[in-house]
Image (cartoon, grey):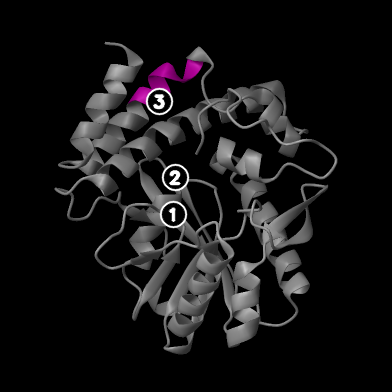
Amino acid sequence: MSRPRARLLLQRAAGRHPRIAIGAATALGRVTGPLGLGLDEAAIRRFLPALSPAEVTRLRRETWTGWLRLRVLEAGLASPTARWPYPPLAGDADPALLQPPMVLAAFHVGPLPALGILLEQLPGEVLVLQLSGNARKRLVVGWTGTEEWQRAAALRRAVSTLRAGGFVVLLVDANEFPTTIDVTLFGRTTRLARGAFALARMTGSPLVPIAPRWRGSRVEITVGDPIPPGDEAAMAVATAGWLERFVRANPQTLGRMFVDSFWGDDEPPRAPGAPGPPSA
C-alpha cells in the first residue's frame, strides 16, 4: 500500500477511533522514518547547529512521525462522529491551576490542536483566536482577519472576554501581523505578534505560555509560569525565552510552520509556495 493511501485510511479512521488511528500513525512513522522524511537537516541546524549527524537523523524521523500523528488528530477534530477526538493526556497538566482571566500564548510547535485537551476543560469562556479552523463545542473560535477593522473587532471581543473572567488563546509566533515586537530567539533577531502582550497589559491579565508535545501516542501539555502584565517588550522577551527553552528540551516539536515563522532579520524568509518538508 502506498504511503498516501495509508495516510488516507488513517484519517478516515480518526473520526470513529481516533486513539487507535494515532497509534497506527505512530507505527507507520517508525516504519517509514528511515526513508529520510521529516523536517530537513538545514532547517533543524538553523536552530540546533550542535546536533550530531545521528541526532539529526533521529530528529528527522521523530518530526515525520509527529507529522503523521498530527494529520490524524486534525482529521478527528474535523469529523462529526468524533465526540472526543483527542489522544490520551500524559503528564499532570491540571486545568484547575489555570485561573481566569488569563491570556494563553500558543506557538506553532508540536501537535497544536491537541491543546484542546486542556482548553476544553477550563472554566468559563475560552476564546481561541486563529488557533484552529475546527470549532469544538467547548471552545469559541474567532478570527482576527486581515483588515484593520477586523483586527479591532477581534481585540474588542478578546478584551470583553477577559474582563468577563474568561480565557483568550492566541498564537504569538504569527509574525506576519503588522504589529510585532522584536525579540532574540536562537541567537537571531526575530519578532512576535504583539496582540497577546497588548491584551495582557490592557486588561491586567497574566500571560501564560503553553505548548504540547507527543509522548508516544499520548500528548503532554507544558504550561509555563505566569508572566505578569506590564511592559509589552519585557513580556515578549520572557515569552521568547520560555519558547526557546521548551524547543531545546523538546526538539521533536519543530516543524515547518515554526521554521517559517522564525526566520531571522539576517536572512530572507522562504518564498511563498516554495517546496518544503511537512509542517507540524
Q: Mark 2 highlights which residue?
A: 214
> Residue 104: horizontal and vertical position, in percent?
52, 69
Residue at screen point 45% across, 61% down = 143
User: Label 3 sits on what residue type?
Assistant: Gly
- The quarter of the image holding the N terminus is top left
**Residue linked to disc 1:** 220
> Residue 250: percent from the left, percent from the top?
58, 46
Callout 1 crowding tier (Cα within 10 Å): few <14, some 14–19, many ≥20: many
Q: Which residue, as the protein is rendered here, is positioned at the far right?
A: 266
Determine the secondary structure under disc 2: strand
The reply to whether residue 252 is in sight is yes
Report, in whole angstroms, how far the alpha carbon at label 3 lies from the one at label 1.
19 Å
**Which class describes the residues within 10 Å of circle 3: few (<14), some (14-19), or many (20+)?**
many
Q: Main secondary structure of the magenta part?
A: helix
Toward the viewer: 81 or 129?
129
Question: Which amino acid type is marked by label 1?
Answer: Glu
Q: Position of residue 246 (x, y in %)?
A: 62, 53
CB under 8 Å between callouts 3 and 1?
no
Crowd tier of the residue under label 2, counting other residues whose Cα lies within 10 Å: few below 14, some 14–19, many 20 or above: many
Task: Identify the residue shown where x is 57% and y is 83%.
Answer: 205
Please state the extent of the stretch shown in magenta in the rendering. Answer: 28-34
Depth check: give the residue in front, 63 or 258: 258
Residue located beneath label 3 in the image: 29
